[in-house]
Amino acid sequence: MIFRDALSGDFTSIAALHTRSWREHYSGIFDEDYFGKAIEKDRLNVWKERFSKGNSLRKVILVEENNELVAFACTFLDHDPQNGALLDNLHVRSDFHGRGLGLQLMQQSFDWVKSQRPEQSLYLSVLSENKASKQFYLNLGGKVIDTHFEKSQAGNEVEVDVLLWEDRPQRIA
């Protein structure tokens, strides 16, 4: 496995993995019509936009095996005055689950945040109905600090839990 920082040319493979992950994990949560062609275009536009301009407050870490993207994480510094840095995306291909990649990506993201902004915490939002992901984050020491409803990218209302790490993520369960 190779961990590396993403380059601007990586946006298409990131968008493809992001799409695949959402189709696998958000089916039944997001409006099903979104999972046709809309999701592919939407995720591609998001990642193309993110890489179209430099952003020193963003870090995207990729994990590759045999030159194929199998996982990634995207973190934004200074995202929230109270909560700190946002881990906006963490996706691991389902056939690579259970290998510790999610934990390693979270730790690397946390370490980067602390190297840039020692006073900041790391937080993320997870769909409340995405029970497996929520449990994964709880098992890594995340503390639920808020639960609220918001409009999803698919257009429907979803319940979201916000989890926070003040200390480096580690397996606690």
Image (cartoon, helix red, strand yellow):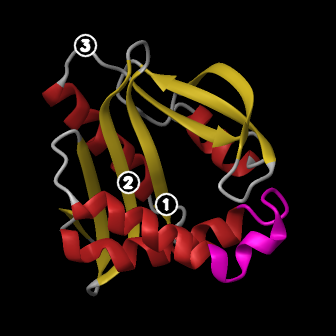
Q: Nearer the viewer, residue 69 or 55?
A: 55
Q: Is residue 171 above or below residue 22?
A: above
Q: Is residue 87 above or below residue 16?
A: above
Where in the figure is residue 79, as x and y percent of width and height? 37, 29
Give the SS element for disc 3.
Answer: loop
**Decide: marks 1, 2 in contact (CB < 8 A)?**
yes
Where in the figure is residue 96, as x and y percent of width and height? 50, 71
Gap between marks 3 and 1, in whole Å?
A: 26 Å
Where in the figure is residue 74, as x and y percent of width and height? 36, 51
Residue to which mark 1 is pinned: 91
> Of marks 3 and 2, which one's residue comes earlier in the chain?
2
- Residue located 39% across and 71% down the image: 14
Q: Is residue 94 visible?
A: no
Which residue type carries mark 3? Glu
Which residue type carries mark 2? Ala
- Residue located 85% across and 62% down the image: 28
Which residue type carries mark 1? His
How many tags in the picture?
Answer: 3
